Image (cartoon, grey):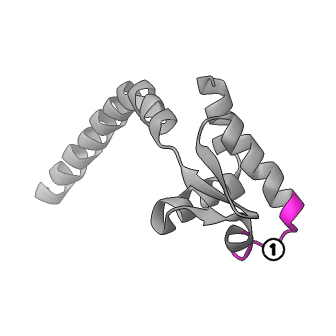
C-alpha cells in the first residue's frame, strides 16, 4: 500500500462516506453499507475493493456475510505527510485574523 493508493482511494466521495459510516457505526456487512447509497451492491463492492487494496478497510467473513471494518493506520501516515501543510494554513489564517482585528480597531 502506498500513499498514492490511499490518496486515490480517498478521491471518491463514495469511499470517503464508506469510511465515515464505518468510523461511526463500526464493522458492517456490505448489505448494511449498501443501504446508505443509491447504487447496486456490485458497484459498492468495487469501492470496497479499492479501500481494501489501499489498506483503509479490512474484510472478515462471518458465515455467509463479509464484514468490513475501518483501518485507520494509512490515515495516520497521511496525517504525518499533511502536517507541514496544516501549519502553513494555520499561519495564513492567523495572518487573516490579525488583519481583521486591525480593521475592527479602526
Point out the residue furthest to the left here.
Answer: 105
Tell me which segment is drawn in magenta: 34-42
Residue for point 68% across, 41% down:
52
In front here: 20 or 84?
Answer: 20
The image quadrant that residue 95 belongs to is: top left
The residue that disc 1 covers is 38
In front here: 4 or 34?
Answer: 34
Q: Check residue 99 for magenta coloring.
A: no
Residue for point 67% across, 53% down:
15
Q: Is residue 1 left or right of residue 48?
A: left
The x and y percentages for residue 26 are 49, 63
Which quarter of the rendered picture does the C terminus lie within? bottom left
Q: Is residue 46 left or right of residue 22?
A: right
Residue for point 17% across, 52% down:
101
The image quadrant that residue 10 belongs to is: top right
Q: Check residue 36 for magenta coloring.
A: yes
Amino acid at each position: 500500500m502506498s500513499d498514492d493508493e490511499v490518496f486515490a482511494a480517498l478521491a471518491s466521495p463514495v469511499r470517503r462516506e464508506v469510511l465515515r459510516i464505518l468510523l461511526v457505526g463500526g464493522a458492517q456487512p456490505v448489505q448494511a453499507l449498501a443501504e446508505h447509497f443509491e447504487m447496486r451492491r456490485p458497484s459498492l463492492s468495487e469501492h470496497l475493493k479499492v479501500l481494501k487494496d489501499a489498506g483503509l478497510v479490512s474484510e472478515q467473513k462471518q458465515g455467509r456475510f463479509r464484514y468490513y471494518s475501518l483501518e485507520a493506520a494509512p490515515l495516520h501516515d497521511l496525517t504525518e505527510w499533511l502536517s507541514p501543510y496544516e501549519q502553513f494554513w494555520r499561519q495564513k489564517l492567523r495572518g487573516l485574523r490579525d488583519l481583521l482585528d486591525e480593521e475592527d480597531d479602526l
